[in-house]
Image: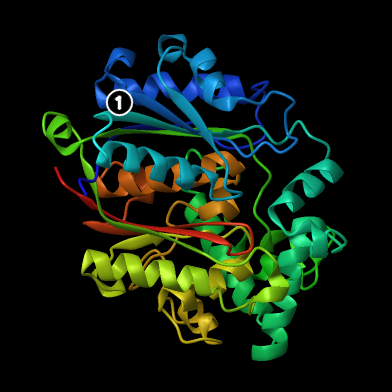
């Protein structure tokens, strides 16, 4: 299989944006990504568009909507992907498969979501579409309630980890303070995150507001080219390996705190890449809730089951630690516009590997891991990235 290279990208600011809709967000990001790659719309063979939607907008058919956002691409073959919170990575894998199959040489991956125009109660119900409604529709707190239940189960089995979750939140907010594209650029500290207050109330189970990622608007775009085409471009980030692993949608049919699909995806990707976690310069992981990041430490092999708190307490995942996790601020600080998230994570990793991450930069970053998941660890994607030129 001939894997494409990432040769250009763009990323809008994430947050509560005045931008009216998903189309407008796409319009902010597509042209700058092509410019970054040094390409024209005529060079693009196909568009792969990730938008979750499921009720955020009455406008569907987002594959074609990208061509409305950037008219020079309106006659380019395009398709929309949806895979819950891993929608962006699903679109990326579709583009990589397309180029690997020899069907085209250049593809553009667009991830976008407009969330904040939707009333809060409706947002919770829309996000619950990423759970198994037949069994989970009545969980109090919507999708946050699903992860609240995960946290409760983890605490019952391994003890109260509230302080460790607060440390994860504080780490990611501190990192996000240096990310000019992040939704919330404020270092709030461990004490604030660990204290239930009017500004930091409980949301679901033991999870507080600071344990939950932000409802955001935003878009991110990647430009991919086959190796031959990429050889003549200014930037090239290669996929040393990538993997996807799935678990049953219903949380009743698995050990919900094992994140076994995440474990299998990490093991497959690291094995195919011929590397270990010690070879990675950093990782961007899916911290939709702080309990997710804690369990992901265990799934990726950074800590034994039930011992994830050690990774944050010992400073392993700090920006200056053995394996910095979420130097971008992660979903927790950067924001989580569903369709854009997986694309955004790969943009952030590419910026690091090219030495273009500004104040976020990890010194001498050479290899990165990216983990993006859909639902409660149902659809799990891992990429191992390296700089090619």
Q: How many marks?
A: 1
Q: Is residue 111 above or below residue 3?
A: above
Q: Is residue 207 above or below residue 83?
A: below
Colouring scheme, one of rainbow, by chain, secondary structure, one colour: rainbow
Instruction: Residue 94: give x, y in percent of width and height.
Output: 41, 41
Q: Tell me which corner region of the image, top left, top right, bottom left or bottom right, holds residue 356.
A: top left
- Can residue 179 be seen in the rendering of this structure? no
Taking 10 as reference, is 212 left or right?
right
Looking at the image, which residue is at 78% across and 43% down? Answer: 123
- Tag 1, which secondary structure? helix
Instruction: Residue 52: give x, y in percent of width and height.
Output: 62, 40
Looking at the image, which residue is at 67% across and 23% down? Answer: 18
Q: Is residue 128 above or below residue 63?
A: below
Instruction: Residue 299: give x, y in percent of width and height.
Output: 47, 75
**Front-lying residue, 369 or 170:** 369
Q: Which residue is mark 1?
A: 36
Q: Residues within 10 Å of mark 1 (few under 14, many from 20)?
A: some
Instruction: Residue 360: give x, y in percent of width and height.
Output: 38, 50
Q: Residue furthest top?
A: 71
**Front-lying residue, 270 or 141:** 270
Taking 250 as reference, is 327 left or right?
left
Looking at the image, which residue is at 64% across and 89% down? Answer: 158
**Front-lying residue, 80 or 16:** 80
- Can residue 95 be seen in the rendering of this structure? yes
Taking 218 as reference, is 141 left or right?
right
On-image quarter of the C terminus:
top left
């Amino acid at each position: 299989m001939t894997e494409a290279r990432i040769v250009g990208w763009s990323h809008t600011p994430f947050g509560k944006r005045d931008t009216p809709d998903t189309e407008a967000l796409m319009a902010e990001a597509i042209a700058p990504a092509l410019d970054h790659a040094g390409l024209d719309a005529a060079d693009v063979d196909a568009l792969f568009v990730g938008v979750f939607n499921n009720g955020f907008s009455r406008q569907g058919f987002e594959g074609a909507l990208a061509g409305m956002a950037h008219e020079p691409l309106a006659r380019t073959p395009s398709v929309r992907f949806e895979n819950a919170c891993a929608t962006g990575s699903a679109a990326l894998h579709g583009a990589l498969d397309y180029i690997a199959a020899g069907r085209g040489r250049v593809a553009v991956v667009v991830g976008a979501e407009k969330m904040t125009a939707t009333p809060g109660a409706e947002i919770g119900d829309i996000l619950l579409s990423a759970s198994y409604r037949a069994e989970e529709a009545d969980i109090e707190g919507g999708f946050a309630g699903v992860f609240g239940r995960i946290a409760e189960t983890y605490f019952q089995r391994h003890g109260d980890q509230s302080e460790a979750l607060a440390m994860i939140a504080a780490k990611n907010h501190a990192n996000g303070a240096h990310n000019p594209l992040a939704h919330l650029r404020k270092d709030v500290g461990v004490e604030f995150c660990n204290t239930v207050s009017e500004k930091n109330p409980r949301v679901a189970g033991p999870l507080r507001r600071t344990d939950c990622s932000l409802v955001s608007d935003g878009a991110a775009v990647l430009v991919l080219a086959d190796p031959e085409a990429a050889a003549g471009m200014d930037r090239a980030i290669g996929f040393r390996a990538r993997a996807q692993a799935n678990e049953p949608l219903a949380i009743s049919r698995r050990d919900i705190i094992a994140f076994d699909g995440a474990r299998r995806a990490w093991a497959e990707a690291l094995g195919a890449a011929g590397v270990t976690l010690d070879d990675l310069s950093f990782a961007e992981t899916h911290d939709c809730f702080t309990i997710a990041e804690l369990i992901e430490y265990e799934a990726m092999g950074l800590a034994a089951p039930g011992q994830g708190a050690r990774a944050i307490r010992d400073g392993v995942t700090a920006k200056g630690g053995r394996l910095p996790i979420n130097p971008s601020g992660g979903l927790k600080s950067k924001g989580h516009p569903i369709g854009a998230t997986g694309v955004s994570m790969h943009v952030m990793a590419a910026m690091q590997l090219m030495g273009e991450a500004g104040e976020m930069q990890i010194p001498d970053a050479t290899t990165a891991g990216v983990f993006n998941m859909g639902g409660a660890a149902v659809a799990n994607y891992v990429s191992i990235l390296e700089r090619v030129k």
